[in-house]
Image: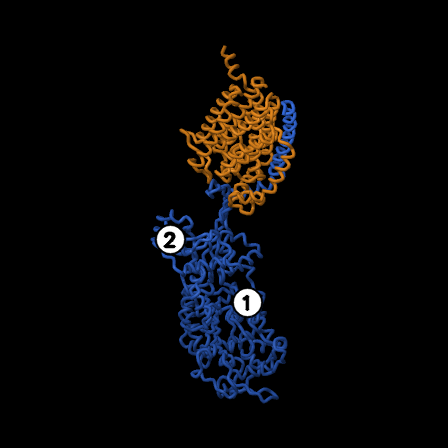
């Protein structure tokens, strides 16, 4: 090959390579153009995502206080050891590695796994809660060995009263998927970023928004190793508000003690503004069990118990009102000018339906003799009310019951309130596709049959006898005592000084006098108590059988009911009590009411 | 007197090429200062590297190409020995054996091969210049394949391909017939699946994550993604010197060496990228022009071999950091931190200048 030919080929091919070289350089430049100009926004935000992190600062939850500032729910500083579930920690290995410092029990691991499967949410989950000071000190000294375990200091909810008042105070639990869904729907999810507890029941649930507050946040710049380089922006959290209740904790203690081992509910109201003074639901449970997820053993114990301790009986317990309905039935009669005194009957202990052979018995064998409306309330004469009911008819009765709030929620500031039921022929047709029998009207008039009420409804209805035209709405929150928006939509709409009301109250005041069904509590009282006793059948007697308390097992015994207010002349407190399987209202529930009245009226506050 | 001395001292220096190279070196130092987060020691070291490289450049520019011709086989053989030395006695860094320690220096013999292999190939073609046939090409190919094979076993596939590529350019320029080129390309395409199977798993992963960096964003694809984020977030004007978040917050790996272009792109933007592209372009263009003007086979082949070695280094590095090519350890000539790379790159420029200024001396 000669030099010229060689030079020719060389030059030619160098030219080819030169163009290839320009082409390749252009390709590179186009790629850079694509990255820096066309995709600039994307990469810019990716760069920011790399280095900018938003850290939420959870707010401190408000405390729950009673009317005198006694703490019912507070926050305690606790230390927990936490793991980041995203790192997929080997729990058994961690347990082993920690074993010479802190013992992690299988229960702790179980709890961790439970939280892991339920709360989709938190960045870290506790593997050990409530460390003791010694444990904290030991861990801190060895912390360098456990880079994957975080020692966290945080506020945990604590209920100093334990089982006392647990139903109305409620409890917190970890946020679960259902809560997340609900919060997202309400557009409140943002408030929970960085926190992991939420109110589940009671005041904790009802006033969640105020108690919770608003989280703050910090925008920080981090490097590739997640070390904080600097803080760019910081917004302080808005801490939750403290909530003052109308509950008088001293009175609450008296009431709970008076209730003793009985099951049931008791609620006391101030009849002038609807303030809830005590709120008892028995049996109870320790709210503290729930805070970090209740363990299975305790949950089973509470949930499977035949005594149903988790049910908030004041608002969710449905009971036939029994004879405690009679004052309201009587009021309906008077408004319709039926059996107005001096009308009276001679009670021989039973009532025969007109034109029918069916007979209804009075609770008192042999009857009460001559009975007018006032005496009928005082002695709780069934015979009088059977006839009254038949004469009055269900529609007229129901319209009065509705005005006193039966069959409707009271809108108390508690979750899970039940409506109760006032039955009618239309209701029965719809529900059972059966016609209404007149006999059912008769038993409805003495508070048996289909009628169902909650203890809070009974308390509210009783308060309405005192202040029929006030917009009463039972409430635990103290500031609602004066607040406008807390009003109920139900008014009894009667003139407070009307003759009808006076007669009803007269009857109720005689309940605690000699001859009345609760005479024995009046005997020892230094002030006048107006009341109505009631007994609600749990067990229906077959025809011809006689109720014999001593032969029935506890669960089948009648419920004892009691509504009352005192002092009769100038009522300061209204009470409604249901003692499940307590037998007679007067003898079981009456003394409980008496103790609460005594405590309240003798200025325990 | 002094002036004429200086003049003679620099008489073989091509002023245009030199200015372009100095411009690149300055950009490199400025970028390195930011990339190293103002690490004075590192910058000092790099200045020392540049000074050594410059001294070598100037010395080489004075050396008569006859000497290159004479020493080419010895240089080639000694650099092969150094390579073998690496295989047996070299130390490992980042999972590959690439360095050996000589006195106080850590030397990377695969960088030296970048010069001695083209020298050797040019020597062969010069030796048989009157009778270049397929045998000559076959010998040249063999001589190229040996160092490439050793380097790819270090494993340093990037450098092996780079050297192989530059060598093939020499064979191409030496007049390998188009028919053989065709057959060769065809058989290469057919044997690709086989080469794939000989690749190390990490190499396969690198290539796969190039096609889809998201397949393992925290593993193999991580560096590629972070680098693209750095360049992309620079935008048109860049974030400004020392203000590149990707660089300063350590999201970007190896900021001073392999990924220095990403630092540059993040902080100086597309405008800066155009500038550095233009300087690279004119540097290579000027070198090619000089090669084309040379008067003998040896000079032309070495010069163009070296030009395309530089070109492919630049290409591989930028393609790698911008997500076109897989991540292989390849420094950016004149910019990346590193002694051997800097000295070798400057030496190449020195050799090209020598060949250009001595063009008449070994004319046939």
- Residue sitting nearer the eye, A508 or A73: A73
Rendered image quadrant of residue B264: top right
Above or below residue B79? Residue A42 is: below
Residue indicated by mark 1: A410
Q: Is residue B339 left or right of residue A492?
A: left
User: Looking at the rendering, in which quadrant would you find the N terminus of chain A?
Assistant: top right
Indicate the position of residue A552 as horizontal and vertical percent values. Answer: 45, 82
Indicate the position of residue B248 as horizontal and vertical percent values. Answer: 50, 37
Kind of element beneath mark 1: loop
Above or below residue B198? Residue A593 is: below
Indicate the position of residue A409 as horizontal and vertical percent values. Answer: 56, 68
Q: Residues within 10 Å of mark 1 (few under 14, many from 20)?
A: many
Cα separation, mark 2 vs mark 1, equals 56 Å
Residue furthest out toward the bottom: A357
Residue indicated by mark 2: A97
Chain given the colour blue:
A
Co-location on one chain, circles 2 and 1: yes
Kind of element beneath mark 2: helix
Residue furthest out toward the top: B1
- Residue sitting nearer the eye, B51 or A170: B51
Which color has been applied to chain B in this rendered view?
orange
User: Mark 1 or mark 2, which is nearer the start of the sequence?
Assistant: 2
- Residue sitting nearer the eye, A25 or A162: A25
Q: Is residue B97 left or right of residue A17?
A: left
- Residue sitting nearer the eye, B184 or B306: B184
């Amino acid at each position: 090959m000669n030099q010229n030919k060689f030079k020719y080929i060389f030059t030619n091919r160098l030219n080819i390579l030169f163009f290839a070289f320009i082409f390749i350089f252009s390709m590179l430049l186009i790629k850079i153009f694509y990255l820096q100009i066309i995709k600039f926004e994307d990469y810019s935000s990716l760069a920011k995502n790399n280095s900018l992190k938003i850290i939420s600062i959870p707010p401190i939850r408000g405390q729950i206080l009673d009317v005198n500032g006694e703490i019912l729910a507070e926050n305690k500083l606790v230390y927990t050891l936490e793991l980041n579930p995203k790192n997929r920690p080997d729990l058994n290995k961690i347990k082993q590695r920690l074993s010479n410092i802190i013992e992690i029990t299988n229960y702790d691991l179980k709890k961790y796994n439970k939280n892991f499967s339920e709360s989709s949410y938190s960045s870290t989950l506790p593997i050990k809660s409530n460390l003791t000071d010694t444990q904290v000190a030991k861990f801190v000294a060895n912390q360098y060995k456990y880079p994957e375990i975080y020692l966290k200091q945080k506020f945990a909810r604590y209920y100093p009263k334990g089982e006392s008042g647990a139903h109305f105070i409620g409890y917190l639990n970890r946020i679960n998927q259902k809560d997340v869904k609900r919060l997202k729907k309400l557009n409140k999810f943002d408030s929970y970023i960085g926190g992991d507890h939420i109110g589940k029941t009671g005041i904790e649930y009802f006033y969640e928004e105020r108690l919770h507050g608003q989280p703050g946040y910090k925008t920080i710049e981090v490097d590739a190793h997640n070390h904080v380089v600097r803080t760019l922006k910081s917004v302080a959290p808005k801490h939750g508000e403290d909530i003052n209740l109308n509950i008088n904790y001293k009175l609450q203690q008296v009431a709970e003690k008076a209730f003793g081992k009985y099951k049931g509910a008791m609620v006391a109201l101030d009849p002038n503004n609807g303030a809830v003074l005590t709120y008892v639901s028995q049996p109870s449970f320790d709210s503290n069990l729930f805070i970090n997820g209740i363990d299975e053993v305790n949950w089973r114990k509470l949930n499977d118990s035949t005594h149903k301790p988790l049910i908030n009986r004041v608002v969710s317990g449905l009971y036939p009102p029994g004879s405690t309905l009679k004052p309201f039935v009587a009021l309906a009669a008077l408004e319709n000018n039926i059996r107005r005194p001096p009308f009276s009957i001679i009670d021989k202990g039973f009532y025969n339906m007109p034109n029918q052979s069916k007979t209804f018995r009075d609770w008192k064998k042999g009857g009460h003799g001559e009975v007018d409306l006032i005496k009928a309330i005082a002695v709780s004469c069934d015979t009088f009310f059977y006839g009254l009911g038949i004469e009055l008819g269900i529609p007229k009765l129901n319209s009065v019951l509705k005005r006193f709030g039966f069959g409707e929620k009271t809108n108390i500031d508690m979750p899970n309130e039940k409506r109760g039921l006032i039955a009618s022929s239309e209701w029965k047709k719809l529900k059972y596709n059966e016609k209404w029998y007149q006999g059912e009207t008769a038993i409805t008039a003495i508070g048996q049959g289909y009628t169902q009420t909650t203890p809070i409804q009974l308390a509210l209805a009783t308060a309405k006898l005192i202040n029929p035209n006030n917009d009463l709405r039972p409430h635990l929150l103290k500031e609602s005592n004066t607040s406008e928006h807390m009003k109920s939509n139900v008014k009894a709409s009667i003139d407070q000084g009307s003759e009808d009301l006076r007669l009803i109250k007269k009857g109720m005041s005689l309940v605690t006098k000699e001859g009345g069904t609760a005479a024995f509590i009046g005997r020892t009282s230094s002030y006048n108590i107006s009341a109505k006793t009631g007994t609600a059948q749990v067990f229906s007697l077959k025809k011809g059988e006689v109720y014999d308390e001593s032969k029935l097992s506890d669960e089948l015994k009648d419920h004892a009911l009691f509504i009352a207010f005192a002092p009769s002349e100038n009522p300061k407190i209204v009470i409604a009590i249901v003692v499940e399987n307590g037998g007679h209202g007067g003898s079981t529930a009456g003394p409980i009411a008496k103790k609460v009245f005594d405590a309240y009226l003798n200025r325990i506050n | 007197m002094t002036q004429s001395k200086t003049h003679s001292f620099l008489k073989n220096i091509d002023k245009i090429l030199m200015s372009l190279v100095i411009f690149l070196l300055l950009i490199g130092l400025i970028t390195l200062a930011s990339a190293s987060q103002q690490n004075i020691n590192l910058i000092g070291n790099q200045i020392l590297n540049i000074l050594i490289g410059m001294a070598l450049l100037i010395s080489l520019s004075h050396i008569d190409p006859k000497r290159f011709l004479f020493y080419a086989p010895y240089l080639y053989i000694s650099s092969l020995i150094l390579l073998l030395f690496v295989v047996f006695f070299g130390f490992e860094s980042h999972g590959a054996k690439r360095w050996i320690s000589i006195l106080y220096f850590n030397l990377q013999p695969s960088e030296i091969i970048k010069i001695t292999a083209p020298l050797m190939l040019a020597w062969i073609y010069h030796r048989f210049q009157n009778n270049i046939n397929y045998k000559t090409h076959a010998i040249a190919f063999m001589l190229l394949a040996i160092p490439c094979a050793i380097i790819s076993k270090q494993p340093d596939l990037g450098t092996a391909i780079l050297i192989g590529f530059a060598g093939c350019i020499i064979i191409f320029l030496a007049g390998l017939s188009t028919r053989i080129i065709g057959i060769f390309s065809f058989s290469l395409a057919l044997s690709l699946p086989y080469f794939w199977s000989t690749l190390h798993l990490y190499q396969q992963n690198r290539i796969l994550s190039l096609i889809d960096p998201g397949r393992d964003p925290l593993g193999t694809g991580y560096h590629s993604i972070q680098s693209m984020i750095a360049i992309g977030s620079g935008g048109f004007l860049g974030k400004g010197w020392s203000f590149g978040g990707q660089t300063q917050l350590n999201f970007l790996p190896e900021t001073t060496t392999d990924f220095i272009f990403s630092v540059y792109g993040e902080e100086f933007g597309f405008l800066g990228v155009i500038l550095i592209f233009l300087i690279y372009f004119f540097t290579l263009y000027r070198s090619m022009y000089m090669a084309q003007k040379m008067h003998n086979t040896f000079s032309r082949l070495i010069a163009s071999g070296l030009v395309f070695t530089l070109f492919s280094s630049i290409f591989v590095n930028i393609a790698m950091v911008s997500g076109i090519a897989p991540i292989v350890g390849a420094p950016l000539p004149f910019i990346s931190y590193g002694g051997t790379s800097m000295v070798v790159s400057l030496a190449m420029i020195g050799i090209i200048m020598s060949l250009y200024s001595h063009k008449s001396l070994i004319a046939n």
